[in-house]
Amino acid sequence: MSGENGSNARLDAILTRAALTRPQRAAVIFQDITWTYAEVHGRACRLAGALAALGVQKGDRVALWAGNRAEFVEVLFGVPMLGALASPLDHWWTWKDAQNALVQIRPRVLIVGAPQATYLQGHDDALRAAGIEHVLHLDDDYPSRLAAATPLTTPTPVSAHDPAVVFFTSGSTGRSKGAVHTHASLTAAAVTMNAELEIPDGERTLHFLPLFSSCMEHLIPLTLARGTHIVQSQFDASGVWEAVLKYGVTHFDAVPTTLRRILEVAPATIPATLRSISYASERMPPQLITALVERMPTVEFVQFYGMMEQLCLTVCGPKDQLRKIDTVGRRMRGAELHLRNVEGQVAGPGEDGEIYARSPSLFAGYWQDETATASVMSDGWLRTGDLGRFDPDGFLVLEGRVKEMIKSGALTVIPSEVEGVLLSHPGVREAAVVGVPDDRWGEAVHAFITVLPGASVEEAELKSFCQERLAGYKRPKVIHIVGDLPRTGIGKVARRVVREQAIKAGKT
């Protein structure tokens, strides 16, 4: 990698650099496996050699459909050594979901874990129709192919703006789309994340969020920092604390949902090694971040805001967690943001608007889908689909997704405002607010809440609580008290599913 600003970078050079400079440092710890950086780099080179022997060339795609495991690192960095594109798939997907993605990118090789391999049975014709020539099983023929392969010694030449990885969107509003990132955009994101989160050399990071989504903001940046990746196959709140103690974890990344559960089982004394916790993905309830900061005074909390199409947009550092509690922070270095109103004009000071963004980490478009790309790009700016405003200090306040705004009569209801009121009730644990079709008002406000352990909350009580704090058109018409909220694979509330449940409940 010539330089670390993304201008002349290649993704796999990040791993090569770590192997050259810290060869004996533990790179990956997973269950009973510990691999040094020299070993991981060697495995990535052998994987590249094995794939080349199968006919993979520059521009080809190699998909990985598996849960969190050690091999994730070598696939992410080994495939680009050939100039090919790695594409990690959601390991919670059904076969139908996976087929949709495979048909889009037509990978020459598909690498699968054990659970996902069972989904492929009986679908040989569909695999061939998706252009897949070889399927490698991580727990079967993959190890032997790696062992027998001739390592790739000279990476295939690429330009910084050649595509390197295809990440699939969550599909929360429809079909998942393949977001293409280049060597330059991923390297730029890694450099920016390391600088803004102040990640030191040798960080020991615990990964329990799914790597298919979190690798962009942490697996790649932490490899640039030559950190140790301690990988858990799935999230378990108690297991997080056990790992922190066992491996001397200094940092982990989370979402508000997992942080709430981690806080509920936190030990009496927070391990001294734990330096930092970063979080993103969805709006952080003020009550939760306040409780986290008070319970873990020696830990620095850092919030960042971005998306699959463009990661590095804003950051809220430790000193601003409570001071700017309703914001997602200031602009990251290199990021440009502005707001546009419904007429497409730049919003005035203090006005709400859709967030437009651009930075060196901007994606290159959706895979072979010019129409979808054009729908989110405007003169080089990404239309984020998020509604927000800037406070007097330039910190960004997220109001929610533009498509999630509720139109009740001629008035707009911001779901996050109603959720904030519900979350301020002492018995409410989580809240999700959606708009449901209504004959009179166009849309009616429906709320779904979960209750804190040991608390007892009734719908009438919550409606009275809202009546004192919200204008009439903002108050939930119906409040559904449920055991849990449906979520996407990365832990965000699946609002589309919540809305479908509200509509269904209204018909019964």
Image (cartoon, grey):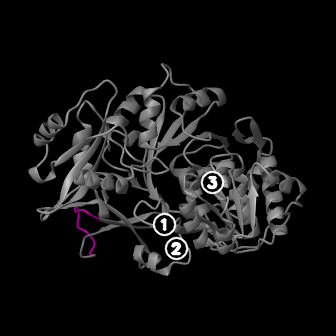
Q: Is residue 280 above or below residue 269?
A: below
Residue at 84% across, 67% down: 154
Q: SS class of the residue under badge 1?
A: loop
Left or right? Give the position of 46 relative to 447.
right
Q: Along the horizontal axis of the image, is 311 left or right of 420? A: right
Q: Earlier in the sequence, mark 3 or mark 2?
A: 3
Look at the image and tell me whether residue 399 can be seen: no
Tell me the residue that label 1 is attached to.
359
Residues shaded magenta: 345-353
Q: Residue furthest top?
A: 268
- The quarter of the rendered structure image containing the N terminus is bottom right
> Which comes sooner in the sequence, label 1 or label 2?
1
- Rendered location of residue 219, percent (x, y): 62, 50
Q: Is residue 80 magenta?
A: no
- Residue type at numbered disc 2: Gly
- In this figure, which residue is indicated by the disc labeled 2? 365
Q: CA distance from mark 1 to mark 2?
A: 14 Å
Q: Position of residue 324 (x, y in %)?
A: 32, 44
Q: Secondary structure at mark 3?
A: helix
Q: Name the residue that disc number 3 marks.
A: 220
Please state which amino acid type lies under the numbered disc 1.
Answer: Ser
Q: Please state if 448 lies on the left or on the right of 46 as rendered.
A: left
Q: Nearer the viewer, mark 1 or mark 2?
A: 2
Place residue 456 in its image quadrant.
top left
CB within 8 Å, label 1 to label 2: no
Tell us which disc is closer to us: 1 or 3.
3
C-alpha distance separating marks 1 and 3: 18 Å
Picture mark count: 3
Local packing at callout 3 (Cα closer than 10 Å; few below 14, some 14-19, many 20+) is many
Question: Which labelled disc corresponds to residue 93?
Answer: none
